[in-house]
Amino acid sequence: MRKIEAIIRPAKLEELKAALNEVDIRGMTVYNVMGRGMTQGVIQYYRGQEVSVDLFPKVKIEIICHEEDLEMIIDIILKVCSTGQIGDGKIFVFPLEEIIRIRTGERGASAL
């Protein structure tokens, strides 16, 4: 099994959830996060004052999946979340050693 972490634009969350729902991928954890990539930030003006903005709002999504669903999920994330602009985000993939459902004690794939 694998864990996918995707950092995406907040505006893409609902579209991504709908696309994943179409292929029966429903389980996910979503966080509101702040971050920056290679860009150093931008200068904006707030009430006439110059303000350097170097952390941008993003959404972090975690999905646990079977190995055979991994590429399909990655392809959906890429298709839905890509605008071609800086700041589209990143996808991280991790191996997953064990899953345990707290309520029943089930382990492995049956705990998903």
Image: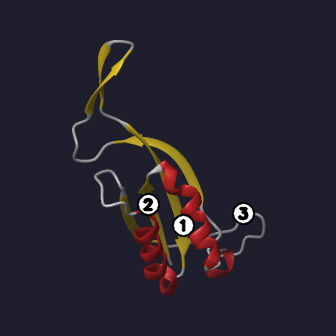
Tell me which numbered mark, 2 or 3, is placed earlier along the sequence: 2
- Residue at 44% in and 60% down: 6
- Residue at 47% in and 81% down: 72
Residue type at numbered disc 3: Ile
Query: Would you call the spot at circle 1 few (<14 residues within 10 Å), some (14-19), or many (20 or more)?
Result: some
Tag 2 secondary structure: strand
Establish if 100 lies above or below 61.
below
From mark 1 to mark 3, how far is it between C-alphas?
Answer: 18 Å
Residue type at numbered disc 2: Ala
Residue found farthest to the bottom: 68
From mark 2 to mark 3, how far is it between C-alphas?
Answer: 25 Å
Residue of label 3: 102
- Residue at 28% in and 52% down: 86
Residue found farthest to the top: 48
Q: How is the image coloured?
A: secondary structure
Q: Quadrant of residue 48?
A: top left
What's the mark number on residue 63? 1
Tell me which numbered mark, 2 or 1, is placed earlier along the sequence: 2
- Residue at 45% in and 61% down: 5
Is the residue under label 1 in contact with that under label 2 (CB below 8 Å)?
yes
